[in-house]
Amino acid sequence: MASLLEVRGMGKRFLGVAALENVDFDLVKGEVHTLMGENGAGKSTLIKCLTGVYQPESGTTQLSGHEIHPRSPDEAVRLGISTVYQEVNLVPNLSVMENLLLGREPRGPFGIQWRKLQKRAEAAMMRLGVEIDVRVRLGNLSIAHQQMVAIARALDVSAQVLVLDEPTSSLDADEVAALFAIIRKLKSEGIGIIFVSHFLEQVFEISDRVTVLRNGQKVGTWSISELTRLELVSQMIGRDATELDRAATLEVVENSGDPILQAKGISKRGSVSDISLELRAGETLGLAGLLGSGRTEVTRLLYGIDSIDSGSLQIDGSQPSRYRPMTAIQKGIGYLSEDRKGEGIFPELSVRENIVILEQVKCGWLRRMSPSRQKELADDFIVRLKIQPPDSERAIQFLSGGNQQKALLARWLAVEPRLLLLDEPTRGIDVGAKFEIMSLVESMRQSGSSFVFISSELAEVVRSCTKVIVMRDRHSIGTLEGDAITESNIVQEIAGS
Amino acid sequence: MKRLPNWCWPAIVLAAVLIFNLVLTPGFFHLEIRDGRIYGSLIDILNRAAPVGLLSLGMTLVIATGGVDLSVGAIMAIAGAVAAGLIARPSETPFAGGAPSLGLAAPLALVAALFCGVFNGVLVAILEFQPIVATLLLMVAGRGAAQLLANGQIVTFNAPGFAMLARGATLGLPNPVWLLLIALLVFNLGTRATALGLFVEATGSNPTAAKVVGIDARKVKLVAYALSGLCAGLAGLVITADIQAADANNSGLYLELDAILAVAVGGTALSGGRFSLVGSLVGALLMQALTTTILTRGVTPETTLMLKAAVVVLVCLLQEPKFRESFKRRVRA
């Protein structure tokens, strides 16, 4: 069967670093072809090259046998390649019908022909089998319905190729089923669909073929029926599941004493469901799973940034009435977000202020820490964590990512938490800083602190955790302890085999 | 290299304006003492800058949290109407029995102003209105309230004791200047000797991160707007005492814009974060120095506004490191 879309040898570099290298990809009519890969694998770069957001530096793209070079998303749409992004890119304050036909409204001598507009909008939604009043404000619809409007809009311009970039990441099970019904309908109409998702179940349910990318290169393309989950996960992570073994066994601290934190079946709608875990002094609990498996969401619940809908969360055996970050801090629980820029640093403030702020919040606004005490605390950590440059008065925004991360870690270490939730603490920082942070964590664990640790690097999880909860599709699916913590066991759990 | 504080640029421009006058405006630096009070253009600048200076202190905190307070002009009118009403027409107030002492009029006016500030704070911090919208409400409705308080008239009174607040002098300096200096001292101590300043800066710099470290952004914002209201009340009292009348229509009109300009010129980013109270005060002084310079040189007052705008642009450009870099490069080339 002739390809609808055919990419040969596509390459794209950013600042000299290859984000995509010599990638081949093809899509036939009426097919769902899934792109998979971990963070930075090149999925979104490939999609952006296809849809005209980026211009590839090498390679060719053919659509129905004609070579195309889309220079803008607009041009790609006109050629027949439409995209629906994870975040809905529509105007919430306009009605559904206006959104559907924004920029291509039917016009007559007296401006927009509203009746015609409404008819066409209704027809577009009917094509998807979705019944909604097209006159309501888009913002009043659920995210799932907004997504369907986005799909309808993408299809309105006789699209041949539809790119769905993580469309299911904020939908619940019923909404996913409705979306998949639409995808199947479009398949039957002969539209080729490129699907990006991190949810294994969904990938196996809806895909015909799957292409795995890793570090900007194509690992391979398989028909979904000839691939097991375990094989797929191994391809994504880049390790053969049978060859992985634990590097070293951790010396387990005698964990006498009661659990610091105990979660029983905690859930949050649209986030994670039924998570249970327990942490005692001297434990490092790893949360392992692919991107989007719900690891971050769990830590946010444990720290009180998001509130739980059901289940119980106990700290030192009692359930706090209103659990917020301030409560967690007072109970000795800390949280280092994976989003350093968004939830971590105060960019204009100095390294000193960024470090001391938590201690200061604990003291309250009336008891200000003396300048000498602030400087002492900051300088102490600058030396201990080797923060570069060693200038406590520099605005933190001028430090490199790794040094910012060290300063944020220092912020928490300064208040000596009993339990620290570390979400990807080593992402995007250099090897030296990674090693320093991880050895610090280990030595603190041995002296009785406990940690929850999230990392996309399995080797790191295996090296530093005393217990690992494996997550898939926002559920916990297994717990590994002691010698059972090996990369191969984790990969097998993730794959569910 | 030691980093210069943000307010050094407006200070340099202020110094330039003064030097310009030293050379070209005869008698500008002339000071003389009459009746134990210093007179001269320099004192005049300080005295006249006091109301906007007071406003800019509260405005600085509000802007540092990432907000803005458009209602300060209207709050000035409310405070003035309350004070004038209590002094001039005690029979129409709850104090009908006997006229309240002058010592009570000023505090009650400040309480009214504080209440206005808290109202703004509740809208912004608790009900999460956009700051511009929230304070625009009181900017418009506040003038109406002030007119109601004054029965739609300009309330005049004759209270020499109260007038001393604006017209009197202590140790040679006019009282409004003292008021401004004391307010600056109190605000600086209140924000820098406690951790309030740090929490305000953290909230404005990254609200999400502030939440993660347990800062209650709602409380911080509430306090900032309340203090801004209080400052506006003080400024309103000064103006009312000066003209011995409360003019609900014109008292403090457009001064919120001058205060915002003073803050911007003083090196506090309108997007929130780092703030400098001293900078805002220097900004207010710079604005007034320009006005006085233009007036003493006999240029038409209409030009004042345009010249002010030009200076604001200049100072804002000077504060931007990128601009200084490219300027240096061009000078060298």
Image (cartoon, grey):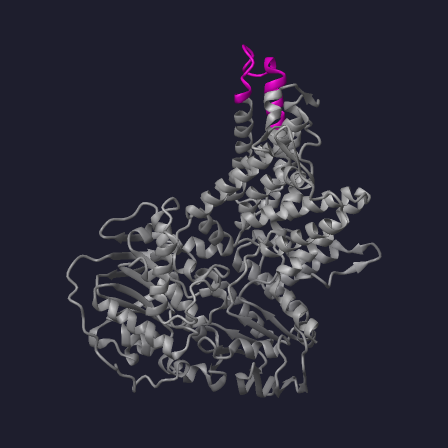
Q: Which percent across, then down, holds residue A19?
A: 53, 81
Furthest toward the right, the residue is A109
In the image, residue A338 sits, relative to residue B152, either above or below, namely below
In the depicted structure, whether residue A51 falls above or below residue A376? below
Quadrant housing residue A333: bottom left
The percent position of residue B281, horizontal first and vertical second, equals: 59, 46
Q: Main secondary structure of the magenta part?
A: helix
| Residue B256, placed above or below residue A435 | above
The residue that appears at 47% across and 82% down in the rendered structure is A213
Q: Is residue A463 visible?
A: yes
Specify the quadrant of the image occupied by residue A190. Answer: bottom right
Q: Quadrant of the N terminus of chain A?
A: bottom right
Identify the magenta region: B79-104
Residues A104 and B246: in front is B246
Query: Viewer-proximal residue, A347 or B25?
Result: B25
Q: Is residue A147 left or right of residue B147?
A: left
**Location of the C terminus of chain A (image quadrant):** bottom left
**Above or below A396: residue A244:** below
Q: Position of residue B152 (x, y in %)?
A: 70, 23
Q: Is residue A474 visible?
A: no
